[in-house]
Structures are given as C-alpha cells and as structure tokens.
C-alpha cells in the first residue's frame, strides 16, 4: 500500500503568513502540520509515499527531504496549479500503479491516526473508504449522504446540505478510482473534485465504505483551527525540561523546554512548549502556547498563541492572546499602550506599538 500526501495549496486563508511559507509547514506544537500526516502514514506501515507539491515545492522538499527520519521513501510529484484533489490523483497514477493507497491532505490532523482505518480498508478491499465527521457548518465541506449505512451521494460544499457528515481529509482508494478521475469533468471552480470521482465510483456500482471518526479532526486552513489544533496537541505532551530554568522561574504543568532554551525570572504555565535556544526573561508564557526556536520574549505576557522562529517580543504592556506570529517578527512597545492585542503577522514583519 502506498501513500499520497497533497501539499500544493496556496493557503489563501492564512495570508499574509503563507505569502512566504507553505501552509503545510506552519507549526503546531512546534512541528509542521505536514509532518503529522507523514507520521500517521508511517505508523500505519506505509513506507512508499509521494507528496504532490505546487509553488512551494522547494520549501517542502527542504523540510521533508528523502523521508529518512520517518523510515519512509519520499517521491515528489509537481502539480502546475491547484486543479483539484482528483487531478492530484490523476497525475500520480504512474507512481501509484495498481496498488491501493491512502490520500492524506497535508494540512489535516487526526488525533488517533489512521492505522485502524488502513487495517479495515485492507481487510474489506472496497473501491474506496471515506472518513466522515459531524460538523456544525457542512456547507463549508464535502458532504456525504448515507442510506442504510451506505454512501449514496457526495456533494462538494452544498448550499443546502442534506447531511452534517463532512469528509475528513483522508481517503483510501483501490485502482478503480483512476477510471473515475478520468471520467469526470471540472467543476464550477475549474477543478477535478474528488467528491465527483467518488460519486462516479458509487454510480458505477463500486463499494464505497463510510467510517465515522470518533476522535477530533482539524483542517488547519484557518487561524482559529491552527490555534485549536495547537491546543489539542499540546495537551497530549509529557513534561520535559532540557533547557535552563533559573531559581526565580516557575514551570507549571505539561511543559516542554527544549535544549538550549533559557528561563530567567519567568513563569511558564502549561500545556506549552519552548523551542531550542529561546530566551524567556521576566515574562509569562500561558497555557496553549508554542514558542519556536531562537525566540526572545522579554517583559511580556503571551498565551494561546504560536510564535515562529527568530521573533522578539519585548516590553509589551498587555498580554498577547490568540495569535499566530510569523518568522523574525519584532513586536516592541512604544510610548502609548493599547488595551489589548491580537496579531496575525507575516514573516519578517516589524511592529512598533506606541507607548
């Protein structure tokens, strides 16, 4: 069985951050989202994985490499433009051959992994197996309609949903899907929709098995979803302190402090993670906060946020909350202080706040 990871989207909902960074490499709990998908495939015993890449292919290649760290073999397949999930399957036919495969969207997270679903798929050998979860806003997703436990219809982002069962971004296919992706035509978005391909399988009498996911699932395409995924994953970490914590500092709860990080007269209240060579001085790091490598936070407070590499937060009069801060950002206090802060900043930004 092979794996196909889709990592070619532009990440428009996360701009300006994704003007300079692949959305699949935005970190959650200090690890790129894309890595969680590769880990899930490797844990399910899948060793031959292709990643479909687009404009950010160089950055993806540099981050992932050959796959050696996960004991997998990575192949890269370039997609010239975002032409739909089914198009990604179509251009991957040579790599996939006649083997069954798992298609995993690179910006999705499943907390319980996919091993059980893969085992079920291998045992039953349907033409496709789709993962579903109940959502409050099904009009934002591909939606499945079931009858007597069988999938009878799929609709991509319906205006009037007949079901609240959204497709999770993990699919399993047999070779029958290649005929379907060749039979369908582009949607109104000028994309080959995977929902149309699966519907074609159904219409041709192929077996499409549904499976309702019982754990949490996150599509990390939006700020709030990334912060929520960060919160959920941080809460699973075990406490580990490899950095330096001075006598005037306190570390409370589930906190990871990586090697080379320094805490000076500061409080870190978990769950939280502090990356290597970060320096936290006279500061408060609150719950559900991820601080990446080489960050400096001085005389400031932050919680429920993600701070990327090389940032400086200094002398801020109010607590930073609910924020995703890009690489090498500087936030410093100037003479007039505002009452509250909420940031979503692109890489290499510099913000001066009046005191």
Image: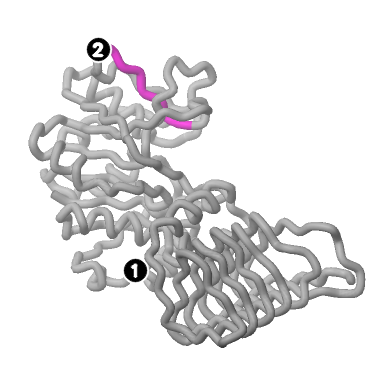
Residue identified by numbered label 1: 64
Quadrant (top left/top right/bottom left/bottom right) for the C terminus: bottom right
Describe the element under mark 1 as helix, strand or loop. helix
- Percent across and percent down for residue 2 are 17, 51
Side of 150 where 227 appears, left or right: right
Instruction: Give the camera-side residue of 291 and 170.
Output: 291
Q: Is residue 117 above or below residue 298?
A: above
Question: Residue at position x 26%, y 27% from top?
Answer: 210
Instruction: Give the camera-side residue of 22 and 322.
Output: 322
Instruction: Give the camera-side residue of 97 and 26.
Output: 26
Side of 43 where 194 appears, left or right: right
Question: Residue at position x 27%, y 20% from top?
Answer: 151
Residue 80 seen from this side: no
- Percent across and percent down for residue 274 are 51, 73
- Percent across and percent down for residue 8 are 42, 53
Point out the stretch of residues depicted in magenta: 141-147
Specify few, some or many for label 2: CA neighbours under 10 Å numbering under 14, 14-19, or 20 or more.
few
Specify few, some or many for label 1: CA neighbours under 10 Å numbering under 14, 14-19, or 20 or more.
some
Q: State which quadrant residue 203 falls in.
A: top left
Q: State which quadrant residue 178 falls in.
A: top left
Q: CA distance from mark 2 to mark 1?
A: 42 Å
Residue identified by numbered label 2: 148
Count up the numbered dots: 2
Residue 10 seen from this side: yes
Q: Any magenta on residue 199?
A: no
Question: Residue at position x 67%, y 58% from top?
Answer: 321
The chosen color scheme is one colour
- Dominant secondary structure, magenta: strand
- Percent across and percent down for residue 104 are 31, 47
Side of 157 where 78 appears, left or right: left
């Amino acid at each position: 069985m092979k794996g196909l990871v889709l990592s070619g989207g532009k990440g428009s909902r996360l701009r300006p951050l994704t003007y300079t960074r692949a959305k699949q490499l935005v970190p959650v709990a200090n690890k790129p989202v894309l890595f969680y998908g590769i880990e899930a495939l490797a844990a399910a015993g899948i060793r031959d994985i292709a990643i479909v890449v687009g404009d950010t292919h160089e950055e993806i290649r540099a981050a992932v490499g050959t796959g050696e760290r996960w004991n997998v073999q990575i192949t890269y397949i370039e997609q010239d433009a975002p032409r739909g999930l089914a198009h990604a399957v179509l251009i991957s036919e040579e790599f996939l051959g006649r083997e069954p495969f798992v298609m995993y969207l690179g910006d999705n997270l499943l907390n319980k992994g996919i091993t059980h679903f893969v085992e079920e798929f291998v045992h039953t050998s349907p033409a496709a197996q789709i993962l579903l979860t109940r959502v409050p806003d099904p009009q934002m997703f591909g939606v499945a309609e079931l009858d007597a436990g069988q999938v009878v219809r799929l609709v991509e982002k319906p205006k009037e949903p007949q079901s609240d069962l959204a497709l999770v971004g993990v699919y399993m296919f047999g070779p029958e899907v290649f005929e379907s992706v060749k039979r369908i035509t582009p949607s109104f978005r000028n994309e080959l929709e995977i929902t149309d391909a699966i519907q074609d399988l159904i219409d041709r009498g192929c077996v499409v098995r549904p499976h309702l996911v019982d754990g949490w699932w996150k599509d990390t395409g939006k700020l709030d979803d990334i912060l929520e995924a960060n919160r959920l994953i941080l809460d699973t970490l075990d406490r580990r302190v490899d950095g330096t914590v001075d006598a005037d500092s306190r570390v409370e709860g589930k906190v990871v402090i990586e090697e080379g990080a320094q805490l000076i007269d500061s409080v870190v209240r978990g769950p939280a993670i502090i990356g290597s060579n970060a320096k936290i001085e006279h500061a408060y790091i609150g719950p559900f906060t991820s601080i990446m490598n080489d960050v400096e936070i001085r005389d400031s407070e932050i919680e429920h946020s993600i701070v990327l590499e090389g940032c400086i937060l200094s002398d801020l009069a109010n607590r930073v909350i609910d924020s995703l801060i890009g690489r090498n950002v500087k936030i410093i206090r100037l003479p007039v202080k505002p009452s509250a802060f909420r940031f979503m900043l692109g890489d290499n930004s510099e913000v001066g706040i009046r005191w």
